[in-house]
Image (cartoon, rainbow, N blue to C red):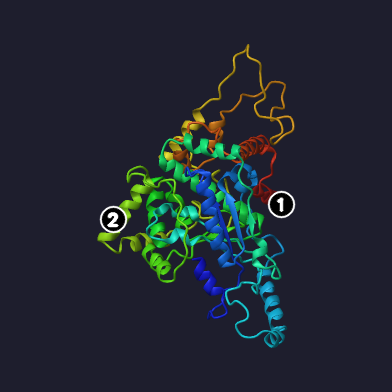
Amino acid sequence: MIWQVLEGLSRDSAKRLRFVPGVVYVDEGAACGQSLEDRAKTLAEMKLILQTVGFPWHIVALEEVFGLPPSVLRYLDQEPSGTKGAYKAAVDSFLQQQHAPAQGEEQLSQPGSQDPQSPAGLPTAAQTEAQPPTAAQTEAQPPTAAQTKAQPPTAAQTEAQPPTAAQTEAQPPTAAHTEALSRLFDSVKTLTAKEELLQTLRTHLILHVARTHGYSKVMTGDSCTRLAIKLMTSLALGRGAFLAWDTGFSDERHGDVVVVRPMRDHTLKEVAFYNRLFAVPSVFTPAIDTKAPEKSSIHRLMEAFMLRLQAQFPSTVSTVYRTSEKLVKAPRDGNAGGPPGPRCLLCMCALDIDTADSATAFGAQTSHLSQMQPPTPPAEAPTTPCCSAGVGRAQGCCRGAEPCGREDPRATVIEQLCYGCRVNMKDLPSLDPLPPYILTEAQLRSQRASVLQEIQEYLIDSDDEAQTGES
């Protein structure tokens, strides 16, 4: 896909693209059990390809999730106030600048003196794109090819700055973070939960990179075949309510950063033929499910089922894919334009919260969590504050003379997850290995909900205020 963007940015293109692309490569070697020598060799190969492309690139290691801020799990407004029309104004300004020096440049430069593939003349408007790596496109590599996923952000680069100036390479991860990441994945019981956790952490890291560098779009290389497999896998994992976000063309769950999937109309075979005919360089890295048996995880089983069925009935993938296009992104109450409600702590999708008497699996789990009572410490045992000081409040959340009962930290996290994430968290015996930003955000949300419940009776509802005004 990067090669197609590169072709669209050239001057020979009939419809030249109007954005400055960039590439993000996430090194997931620690989660896949790679040695330091193999990881260094893969990074060296990726650098050669990224330097050949000429786009701004950023290399990050998956261990950096242990240093992410809790704000990465929060929904941010897509377009701040006062920025309406900023993109159109930026394009108009760019066109004016191009027309002014056009004649002078033609006299000073000979034809062919400038690289037609150089993106140096592109506008830096707010509409920026993220380009995924081409290594994940080949059919020979299983669905794990998403490891070489390079997400291109694009907006913070200035027009005068050359693309190579934006190259950033993270410092080598510390041994403590590498050990913590290995301990996290070793503690997960099933391969299915490991793949879901890896995808979640990768998404959080790419989102942080996009926000840090000012990118508003992230373009992934998910093909039609991969999205069809993902749709069936999500149904099996209990994520049917979020299929429109997980497999649609655009995903606006994060607010300010939109994930788009422009390769969703191409099958894996078409992508493999394109890479072969145009000699697109690729880097293959082992995935977390490499050499795993077919029935080792739901992802592997569903992939083998879909590919085997596609070989016998060539319209299988397209039929499943077309089904995902008919899904509508709308909350249960139909108020799509209202303020965002509670969101899942991990996947950041809007929660479909059912009442305790609901005849659904989510309602049954909600009822079970509501019946869990916090353990009461013995009378002889010294009382301890219910939450650590410095997180949310300076003196902890206990404000009375007697400390309140300490809540179960696992229940606090589980109640903030959607049904699909709750199922995956069952395979994680302890929450201690999770990155700190997840636990911190869960505690902040719990404290915020507790305070809101205490002052709820003192708040003035908008409906009550309107009735008071009419009287």
Q: Which residue is mark 2?
A: 308
Q: Quadrant of residue 322?
A: bottom left
Q: Left or right of 156: which side holds 303?
A: left
Q: x%, y% of residue 61? A: 57, 48
Residue type at numbered disc 2:
Arg
Residue type at numbered disc 1:
Gly
Residue at position x 72%, y 64% from top?
82
Numbered tag placed on residue 469 in the rendering: 1
Q: Is residue 15 above or below residue 299?
A: below
Q: Left or right of 365: which side holds 207?
A: right
Can residue 193 be seen in this snapshot? yes
Q: Nearer the viewer, residue 144 or 464?
A: 144
Q: x%, y% of residue 411? A: 53, 32
Mark 1 residue crowding within 10 angstroms, few (<14) / some (14–19) / many (20+): few
Q: x%, y% of residue 376? A: 58, 19
Q: x%, y% of residue 161? A: 70, 67
